Image (spheres, grey):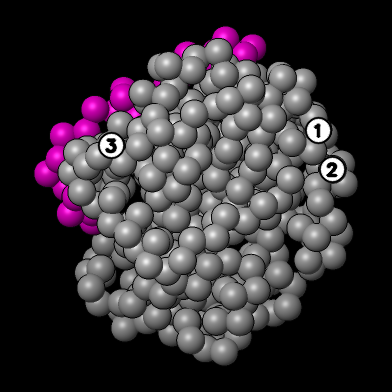
């Protein structure tokens, strides 16, 4: 079921503001599961980095666990997080790094299934700007696309800048979403480069709109760019809700881990064939290639890599004023309890 959740601009701004308040009220357990019905917000349902969510539904694994899961979609992870904080949904499939950011703002959220141990993100540069944008050292003065301000693409872009001696206030992040909106911004020159994922990356390269500058779709690429494994795509939920709905969380985890194992034993073409036809906007062959390029980012067991959280903390603290001097209890940002039982 692909049901977009739309918020008015005013409502979205109000909800987003909640995430900036320390220890604010926001419904940590306001959204309750009834009769096995769960709402999960995904930071872009058709993005390959979040593919396990829709694939689990397509394979019928949620139903096998007796769950009725509705997958909703928002174009950026920061908007998905807003839906969780406001109590509209029980969980988010988005980047793990938001759990650290939220803890610093007084919200206790944890990853219960770690879908990926690399970002799956790619920094691309437009064909026109390729001559003077050859590395993050050239970010100064550029307009760089991100899915949304405060999103994980925004976080990672800022880290790459700081790591390469470029102040975060010397370039302009532009919220351009993903897919067609990102492609148009690149083509029209409103951005010179940007951070995006497959299948958008595959279409950029295929249409010769630009090229890959930094590839973080593999653990190796993550280590090279970020200095270690960077756990990204995950199912994260409010800790209070997890503790009071352990049976439901275990069922969700069982289904998602079963999908991760299925993915590890099937070809990109077989995976693509299970997905909705409209996800392959660049054609079936290109979509399968996008899945192939991104597959290395996924875990096979849903368990958080032991040294992953420390990498994420180091990356975020390098540029994020909310986290720079904050004490983050990493053990409270994730749990391996459910994934280990799922085996």
Residue in view at x 28 percent, y 37 percent: 107
Does 224 appear above or below 123?
above
The reply to whether dot 1 and dot 2 touch (C-beta < 8 Å) is: yes
Q: Position of residue 302 (x, y in %)?
A: 57, 26
Q: Is residue 294 left or right of residue 278?
A: left
Residue wearing tag 2: 274
Q: Is residue 330 magenta?
A: yes
Q: Position of residue 20 (x, y in %)?
A: 24, 52
Residue wearing tag 3: 107
Q: Would you say residue 239 is visible in this rendering?
A: yes
Total tally of numbered discs in the picture: 3
Residue wearing tag 1: 59
Q: Is residue 306 magenta?
A: no
Mark 3–mark 1 Cα distance, whole angstroms, equals 33 Å
| Quadrant position of residue 74 | bottom right
Marked residue nearer the N-terminal end (3 or 1): 1
| Quadrant position of residue 17 | bottom left
Residue in view at x 12 percent, y 44 percent: 325
């Amino acid at each position: 079921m692909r049901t977009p959740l739309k918020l008015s601009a005013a409502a979205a701004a109000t909800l987003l503001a909640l995430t900036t308040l320390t220890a604010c009220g926001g419904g940590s357990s306001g959204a309750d599961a009834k009769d096995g019905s769960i709402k999960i917000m995904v930071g872009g349902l058709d993005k390959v980095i979040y593919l396990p969510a829709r694939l689990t539904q397509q394979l019928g694994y949620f139903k096998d666990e007796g769950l009725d899961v509705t997958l909703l979609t928002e174009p950026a992870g920061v908007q998905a997080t807003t839906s969780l904080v406001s109590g509209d949904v029980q969980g988010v499939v988005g980047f793990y790094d938001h759990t650290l950011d939220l803890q610093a703002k007084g919200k206790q959220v944890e990853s219960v299934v770690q879908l990926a141990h690399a970002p799956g993100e790619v920094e691309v540069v437009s064909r026109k700007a390729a001559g003077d944008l050859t590395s993050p050292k050239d970010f100064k003065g550029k307009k760089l696309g991100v899915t949304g301000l405060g999103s994980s693409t925004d976080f990672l872009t800022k880290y790459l800048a700081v790591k390469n001696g470029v102040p975060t206030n010397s370039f302009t992040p532009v919220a351009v979403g993903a897919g067609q909106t990102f492609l148009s911004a690149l083509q029209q020159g409103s951005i010179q480069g940007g951070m995006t994922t497959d299948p958008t990356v595959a279409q950029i390269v295929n249409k010769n709109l630009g090229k890959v500058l930094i590839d973080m779709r593999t653990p190796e690429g993550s280590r090279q760019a970020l200095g270690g494994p960077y756990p990204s795509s995950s199912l994260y939920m409010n800790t209070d809700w997890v503790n009071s709905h352990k049976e439901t969380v275990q069922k969700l985890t069982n289904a998602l881990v079963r999908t991760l194992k299925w993915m590890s034993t099937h070809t990109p073409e077989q995976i693509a064939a299970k997905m909705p036809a409209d996800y392959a906007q660049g054609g079936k062959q290109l979509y399968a290639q996008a899945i192939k390029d991104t597959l290395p980012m996924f875990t096979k067991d849903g368990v958080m890599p032991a040294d992953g959280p420390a990498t994420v903390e180091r990356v975020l603290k390098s540029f994020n004023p909310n986290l720079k001097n904050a004490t983050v209890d990493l053990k409270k940002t994730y749990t391996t309890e459910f994934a280990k039982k799922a085996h």
